[in-house]
Amino acid sequence: MSLINQMLRDLESRNTPNNAAPTLQHNIQVTQPAAAKTPFLAWSLLAIIAMSGIYSAYKYSKTLTKTPPVIVTDNIKKDPVPIAPYEKVLAAPNAVTDPTPKIELKPSENTTNQPASVAQPETVAPMVQPTPPTQTVQTAPVVQTAPEIISESPIKKTPTSAKPPALVKLTTAKEQADLLYRQAENNSEDYSATYKLEQALKLDPRHLKARLLLAKTLHNQGQASKTAEFLDQSLALFPDNLQFINTRAQLYLQQKNPNGALKTLQRIEVTNSSTETYLSLLAATYQQLQSFDNAAKVYQRLVTINPEKAENWLGLALSQEKLGNLKLTREAYQQALSKNTLKESIANYIKQRLIELR
């Protein structure tokens, strides 16, 4: 410690001139810099501007208190805030153009909580009081909220054009063939019916009704060769179909081909068939083949099935006459003549034969 104290004393002795004790100067005065004039001018200018703004605000507030509420609502009416769509505003124009401001009244504590009705102006008018500027500005949202009430009413959307019903697609060839068959059936006398039936059979070759109608149509049009070819194709698909068999046998008889007719008719058993058309064709075929015994048997079945048909009795008489059975021949001729349904030329022939067979 003594060493440190000695060093400190040496330092003090070196810093003090002439080994004099250090002293402080008590007469030192602090000099302040000269105040600048610029801040004072700035603050004065700001104060003047502030006073002018306050005065202008005061004058503007006086003009607002003198302006009636109608002017405020008119200004709002001229530039309304678009809240609802244009179509909704047109639906009730009074919601925006009504100049009377609508003020919401707060119900008192003693009364029931029911909203004041806007539609009754006589109850609201006496309670309207001159409002200060702040309250006048607050009435503007009330006028603007009127279109929101209109938006609650349901507005029908413009109807979109109805879509046409989707066309029913015929998914299968059979359905398309059925459609063509029905069209041809409704116009069977038209030549387009033949084309439609042919198209139907291309889609469905086993369409039986279309085949029968086409065979009939071709036969009625006198197209014998085309009808015969078509019937042969049909019999290849339907070998036991009686209608195809009868039509094909009839064509053979018209072409003086009884062997083809007999072969076609023998596709089915004679004993199992009792249809008059089939038996008549079979009997006529036997007559062309001059097989009068078989023809007489078939005609005997025919007069049993339909005794009122004169043609059946006439066929039986011709067959019995060829066989030499005169008694049965005369009886059959008399039965045919008694029906009074034969042509006059045939009736005269029968009368002539009866005279000769006496």
Image (cartoon, helix red, strand yellow):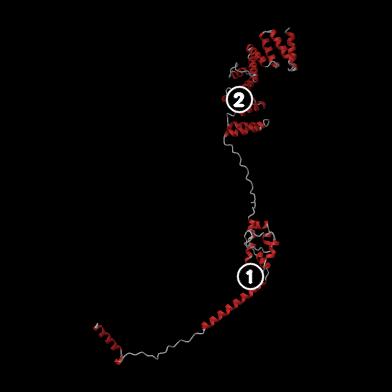
Q: CA distance from mark 1 to mark 2?
A: 106 Å
Foreground pick, 120 / 337: 120
Quarter where residue 105 is shown: bottom right
Compared with residue 18, is residue 56 higher up or lower down, i.e. above or below?
Answer: above
Question: Mark 2 belongs to which amino acid?
Answer: Leu
Question: Mark 1 belongs to which amino acid?
Answer: Pro
Asked whether residue 180 appears in the rendered view, the answer is yes
Q: Quadrant of the C terminus?
A: top right
Q: Is residue 8 left or right of residue 130?
A: left
* Residue 133: mark in rendering: 1
Where is residue 104 shown, x and y percent of the image? 64, 62
Q: Quadrant of the N terminus?
A: bottom left
Task: Residue under label 2, please give it.
Answer: 231
Quarter where residue 335 is shown: top right
Outermost residue to the top: 358
Where is residue 66 shown, x and y percent of the image? 67, 72
Foreground pick, 230 / 161: 161
Compared with residue 34, is residue 261 higher up or lower down, i.e. above or below?
Answer: above
Provide the secondary structure element on which disc 2 rests: helix
Q: Residues within 10 Å of mark 1 (few under 14, many from 20)?
A: some
What residue is shown at x 64% (from left), y 32% (from top)? 182
Asked whether residue 99 appears in the rendered view, the answer is no
